[in-house]
Image (cartoon, grey):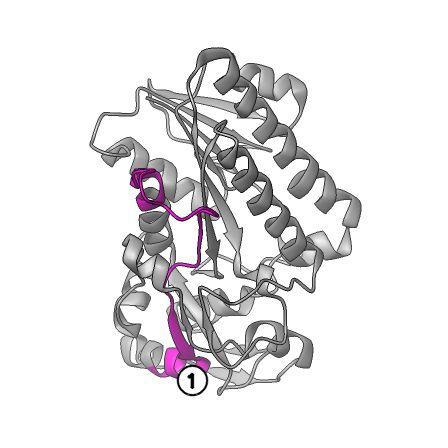
Amino acid sequence: MRVLVTGANGFVGRALVQRLLSEGVACAGDVSQLLLVDQAFYNAPEHARVSFLAGDFGAPRTLDSLLSEPVDIVFHLASVPGAQAEADHALGDRVNLYATLALFERLAQQAQAHSRVPRVVFASSVAVYGAPLPPLMDEHTLPKPTASYGVHKLVGEQLLSDWTRRGKLDGRSLRLPGIVARPGLSAGHGSAFMSAIFRAAQLGQRYTCPVSPSASAWWMSRPCCVDNLLHAARLSADGLHAQRVWTPPVLHLEVKRIVDALAVRFGSARVDYSPDDRIERLFGRQPPLMDRRAVEAGFQHDGTVDSLIARALSDD
């Protein structure tokens, strides 16, 4: 099968590409060609089955090249992250909205021309829920985005759901939390502190955390995220609920619980706290979350806090 990954050089994209090359989608070797697109590539895997394209994934010329032949599965990961999308509305709209619409439209045209409906896994975000959040969250919690990024992701979900309803795409959207542990701070990610805690402990460095020790957040490691993306691609279309949107299970943990576990693993974790009300309001007051449809569909979290830490740092 031919598989396309947008945002393939990103933090999650690089790990997904490695898994696709080693494990395939349903079984090892079932990916005959892996098409990767991102703004730029570094340390990219050299493999006979891999093709790279640096550029805007929604540009007509890029889409012409990527979709010169039909694709079977698309993992749409590319986006401008939250803080950056809020600071530069034009850029966020261009990438997260218009380019996503262009990609979905071209994939739908493929289905029309070749009678071959591509399966599309869309990396949405818990940002669709906005803030403040209700005391408990489940599959019935309505999205109420309060930032541009959340709006972008919700629109992407709706577009994909509509193309799926019309029989042109086979869509699946996952509302993902902040994924840990990114290798460095990113000005584009408001949840960057979640990874910074891990990295500071790992390096024996002092870190000033912008949320309080009692702040509660949703945690998922990069390997677990990739597990869930691949699981979404493997799900049979039979019996899936109409919207095709899931919020995968997460570990709901206070920051202090993470810091204490890191201290045990590394001997110490030198974390000071200087809470920023805006960051804590958006990323540190997350309630218990249980999307029963996601559990029933087979999506999973990391298991325990120790497993989360081990997995988050396992693929450095």
Query: For this view, does 156 lie left or right of residue 309?
Result: right
Per the rendered image, the range of residues in magenta is 231-260
Dividing the picture into quarters, in which one does residue 100 lie? top right
- Residue 86 as seen in the image, left or right of residue 287: right
**53 lies above or below 94:** above
Is 99 placed above or below 33 here? below
| 159 and 287: which is toward the camera | 159
Which residue has dot 1 on it?
A: 256
Above/below status of 11 relative to 234: below
Helix, strand or loop status at disc 1: helix
240 inside magenta stretch: yes
Q: Amino acid at mark 1?
A: Lys
Residue at x 48% of width, y 23% of height = 52
What residue is rendered at 38% in x and 30% in y? Answer: 45
**At which x and y percent is residue 113?**
51, 12
| Between 266 and 180, the one nearer to me in the picture | 180
The residue positioned 43% from the left and 77% from the top of the image is 288
Give the image location of residue 269, x and y in percent.
40, 80
- Asked which quadrant contains residue 94, the reply is top right
Across and down, in percent, residue 123 comes to 49, 47
| Membership of 242 in magenta stretch | yes
